[in-house]
Image (tube, rainbow, N blue to C red):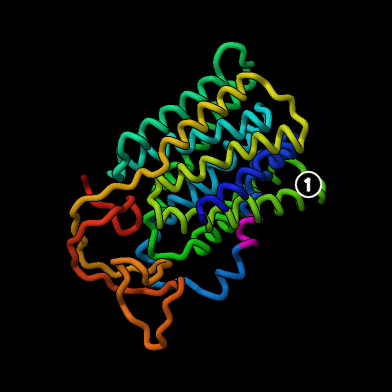
Amino acid sequence: MRAALAALLFGASTPFAAQIARETNPFTLAGLLYLGAAIAVLPGTVTRRPDPAALRRGAGRLAVAVVVGGAAGPVLLALGLQHASAANASLLLNLELVFTVALAALVFREHIGPRVATGAVLVGAASLILTGPGATAGLRLGAVLIAAACVCWAIDNSVTAELDELAPAHITFAKGLVAGTANTVIGLLAAPAPAPPVVGAALLIGALGYGLSITLWVAGARDLGAARAQVVFATAPFLGAVVAWTVLAEPVRVPTVIALVVAAIGVALVSGSDHVHAHAHDATVHDHEHVHDDDHHDHTHEDGFTGRHQHPHEHGTVRHSHPHVPDLHHRHVH
């Protein structure tokens, strides 16, 4: 559910970001989007500060997320939006799914399975349809830049899905504050500041489409695993294309429609990709959101509280068999 809501927010934001990309320095736009994200999650960051020891343990992975996902990725997207229509740019963002699945399988050893792999291939094929015969040189350049942004976010996805030392709001705030400030400063040094209405629009888009969206995605990825959460998130580009056609009145082109259908089939293939086998869990201590209705969270609370909550907790050694996906508790090798 949270990954789906993240997709809804991000998908709706892309066409509107494309509208202001052509009149704003890419660094300034990227910086403002992520500063907006930091503002959106500031209340949650203030009310629940990160544990210093947990922050030290996750510092390396958090730095990767800030630099690659918060700084480099948004700038590459802003550059790509200058060369691609809002609908095409939205669908090209599905490449984030392809690269996330590839990294999750090859680097992070996350279990993928044939349905996920086939779905990723179809999504990649949809992007090739967009940039095939008849595509302009500008669209192809935009596609390369957006694909590079997707590589950055795939790395970010795989790292933050396992960053259980910090709450999702803390991760989003760090990315927004550090990367957003750095990119905004670079942009303002390179070009005049955009008009106040553009600044306000960028901050609002960033708050909803990046701040709330990223926070929800990180929480969802911990429940589903990076690859599967990204599959749910891959519905965002479809919404972006629909917004571009209906709200922004972009013309509907045949290659875009074909690409949308192929990508939709790929996303649908990945549904229901859980699996079951005997597996073992080593003892561990970590901090993440959870409920007490599964086999992994049987600790008790003095006040009897059992709803969704977050706190440091311990898992003992256990071996069992049940349907699962590669979530925070099931990153074992197959």
Question: Magenta stretch?
Answer: 35-40
**Residue 267, can we see it?**
yes
Question: At x 40% / y 60%, what residue is drawn?
Answer: 59
Question: At x 51% / y 74%, what residue is drawn?
Answer: 48
Measuring from the top left, give residue 264's x and y in whole percent.
52, 33
Q: Secondary structure at mark 1?
A: helix
Question: At x 54% / y 41%, what residue is drawn?
Answer: 235
Q: Is residue 96 left or right of residue 279?
A: right
Which amino acid, mark 1? Answer: Val
In this view, the residue in front, 246 or 219, is 246
Q: Quadrant of residue 290?
A: bottom left
Determine whether 177 is above or below 45 in the image. Answer: above
Per the image, the residue denoted by label 1 is: 198
Question: At x 77% / y 46%, what residue is drawn?
Answer: 193
Q: Quadrant of residue 77?
A: top right
Q: What is the quadrant of the C terminus in the image?
A: top left
In this view, the residue in front, 219 or 21, is 219
Query: Residue 331 lies in magenta, yes or no?
Result: no
Q: Quadrant of residue 282?
A: bottom left
Q: Spot the residue most to the top.
A: 133
Measuring from the top left, give residue 26's x and y in whole percent.
66, 39
Measuring from the top left, give residue 271's x and y in whole percent.
42, 42
Measuring from the top left, give residue 275's x and y in whole percent.
29, 47
**Residue 23, can we see it?**
no
Determine whether 25 is above or below 203 in the image. Answer: above
Query: Residue 39 lies in magenta, yes or no?
Result: yes
Q: Is residue 31 left or right of residue 223?
A: right
